[in-house]
Image (cartoon, rainbow, N blue to C red):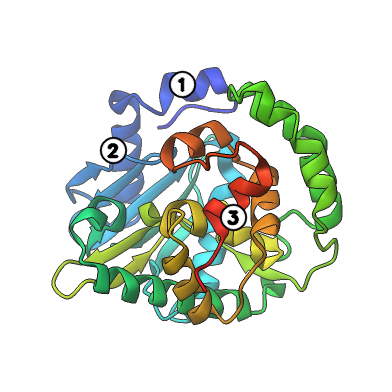
Amino acid sequence: MLPVVETDEQWDEVVPDETVMRPGAEDLCARLGLAGAPLTRFPDGSQPVYAVGDEHVLKLFPGAAAEDGVAEGRVLSHLQGRLPVPTPQVRSFGPYENGWQYVLMSRLRGENLARAWDRIPQGDRERLVTETGEALAVLHSLDPGPLRDVLGPGDWGAFLDRQRDGAVEQQRAHGLPDHWLEQIPEFLASVPLPRTPRPALLHTEVMQQHFLVDPDGWQLTGLFDFEPAVIGDRAYDFVGVGLFVTRGDPKLLARLAGAYGHTFEPAELLAYTLLHVYSNLPWYLRELDAPAEATLPALAEAWFGTAP
């Protein structure tokens, strides 16, 4: 029912087109015993995702991203009931047709934290980041061994080398000005990162956008979107934390780190920011305040420093 999607051109043609996607989603739902359930496509995210009635969510992965579908199904199954914040419960996952993968999961309740953030009182924000730190501590304590067959990158040191080799060009492609680009090689060379860290299961995109919250009492009600999960150094997960959860607020980051049980050096976290697979420094500079001193060490302190 869904066509082959293995190239960027096919992705751009098929994935946004509901006249193609919806019949495929309806067909798959029927095969899963949910024929006739109303489908509502979520507007966010790179993958096509549908609410299936009030109880389920169907996430589809074209052939070009099929490995992500396998990874998300396996990771969510591994996490089920093990974190202090709810994660989607897997109802079914596997191949569909023409290379597509799917994950059928339970629907979490709540409002997206990013959309709610401006309405949340400071005291509740502090409690929410505490809950986030506690959830991350549990996530990183779990044995990732059962997931090694589906999650990369394998050799963490080799991964760092690859990312470091392409770091300048990655930021140049995003339009980073030269005075920042020129600093990247020396800054990365100055920050020691572990090549064989204690392996941890990483979400890799710990952002307000991937949490749900109950406005009645402001409690976390969900953490989702584990398709980019990897196994690696736990500090890598704090890139998203500093940029998109605490958003350069040193007091909130200190509170979150206290709940997590460890504080990372600002330079270490900025180095991982530059080495992150999805790193886009110009975007972050638009989102967060930059220091008056336009240097990477100053930027590290501004975004990832913690209050005494």
- The Cα–Cα distance between marks 2 and 1, rounded to whole angstroms, is 15 Å
> How many labels sit on residues?
3
- The Cα–Cα distance between marks 2 and 3, rounded to whole angstroms, is 35 Å
Q: Residues within 10 Å of mark 1 (few under 14, many from 20)?
A: few
The nearer-to-camera label among 2 and 1 is 2
For the point 73% across and 65% down, which residue is it?
148
The nearer-to-camera label among 2 and 3 is 3
For the point 43% across and 18% down, which residue is it?
13
First along the sequence among labels 2 and 3: 2
* Nearer to me, 138 or 123: 123
* Nearer to me, 8 or 103: 8
| Residue 178, image x, y percentages | 68, 22
Q: Residues within 10 Å of mark 3 (few under 14, many from 20)?
A: some
| Residue 303, image x, y percentages | 53, 52
Q: Which mark is residue 43?
A: 2
Q: Name the residue tied to disc 3.
A: 301
Disc 2 residue type?
A: Pro
The correct choice, above or below, for 198 with respect to 212 in the image is below
Camera sees residue 204: no
The correct choice, above or below, for 270 with respect to 55 in the image is above
- The Cα–Cα distance between marks 1 and 3, rounded to whole angstroms, is 39 Å
Quick check: 4 left or right of 251?
A: right
| Farthest left residue in view | 216
First along the sequence among labels 1 and 3: 1
Q: Name the residue tied to disc 1.
A: 12
For the point 61% across and 26% down, which residue is it?
176
In the rendered image, the quadrant that contains the N terminus is top left
Q: Which of the 4 quarters of the picture holds residue 142?
A: bottom right
The correct choice, above or below, for 228 with respect to 196 in the image is above
Disc 1 residue type?
A: Asp
For the point 68% across and 26% down, which residue is it?
179
